[in-house]
Image: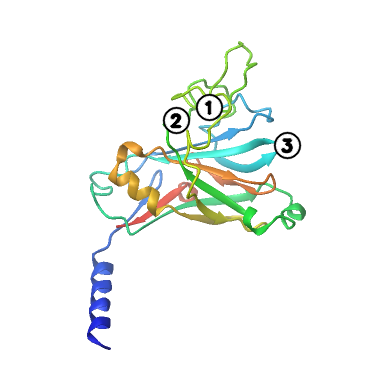
Amino acid sequence: MNRLHLLLSLLLSATSLSASEVTFQNGHEGYDGASDVTLSGELEKARLLNYGASETLDVAGVAAGGIRKLGLIRFADIVGPKRIPPGKAILSARLELYKIKDAGNADTFSQLQPNQRFIYAHAMLRPWKAGSGNGDQDPDGATFSHQNSPEGVPVYWGKANQIETGPVKGVDYQLTAPSTSPLEQGAEAVWMQWDITEFFQDWVTNPEKNFGLLLTARSYYVGAQFSSCESPDQQLRPRIVVTY
């Protein structure tokens, strides 16, 4: 081994020995800062309802020109004592969601182009509130809007703004450079993973920019039902595993 290789080996070993790992998951080591909610599209009967307290988080793609299911998820309070020290360089961060079942038809899924068989994670650019409903109306919680609501007052997807058609590309969420996770149809009761190192580093450097992630799919036949932050099984709740 020449001197350069020896030096690189020593540096990598030192980095490995000094690296720390932390897991953010509700109920894990006192952490309780994660929240999520399913947004139902305009064509869904549930479009006025809030699912912030649901035990599942659903994502499914476009149906008849409208977005059918979107997932919002955020891990707050990630910087501080017993968390990530301020200013730390993040070596890796991955979002892990436990898939309960698929959303689409297996026959149609097999006909899709390979670049459609993903679930995308986009950085959110504006604040939102998950809400506390479980199939109930909650004007303060995130839900798709409908102009003809029972009281004649629109119900907005997020408390922070008043955009009636749900999260808007480039306004409410970052359209470019999403993280992707391939969906394996028929593989149920498995963990899916997204590399969110770049997003997480930004949240550590600028905690005020931590608005979480938007989960989307580009076909109605691509999607999944995941265990949510409200799952009764703490081991199956969404988590972020970070090395710094």
Q: Are marks 1 and 2 in contact (CB under 8 Å)?
A: yes
Q: Amino acid at mark 3?
A: Ala
Please name the residue shown 24% across and 73% down the image: 11
Q: Which residue is mark 3?
A: 64
Q: Residues within 10 Å of mark 3 (few under 14, many from 20)?
A: few
Q: In the rendered structure, which disc, 1 or 2, sits on the residue that comes first in sequence?
A: 2
Q: Amino acid at mark 1?
A: Trp
Q: Amino acid at mark 2?
A: Trp
Residue 83 location (% of width, % of height): 28, 47
Residue 224 location (% of width, % of height): 61, 47
Marker disc for residue 128: 2
Please tell me whether residue 137 is drawn above or below residue 205 in the rendered image. above
Q: Residues within 10 Å of mark 2 (few under 14, many from 20)?
A: many
Mark 2 against mark 3, which lies toward the viewer?
Answer: 3
Please name the residue shown 35% across and 38% down the image: 209
Marker disc for residue 157: 1
Q: How many marks?
A: 3
Q: In the rendered structure, which disc, 2 or 3, sits on the residue that comes first in sequence?
A: 3
Q: Quadrant of the N terminus?
A: bottom left
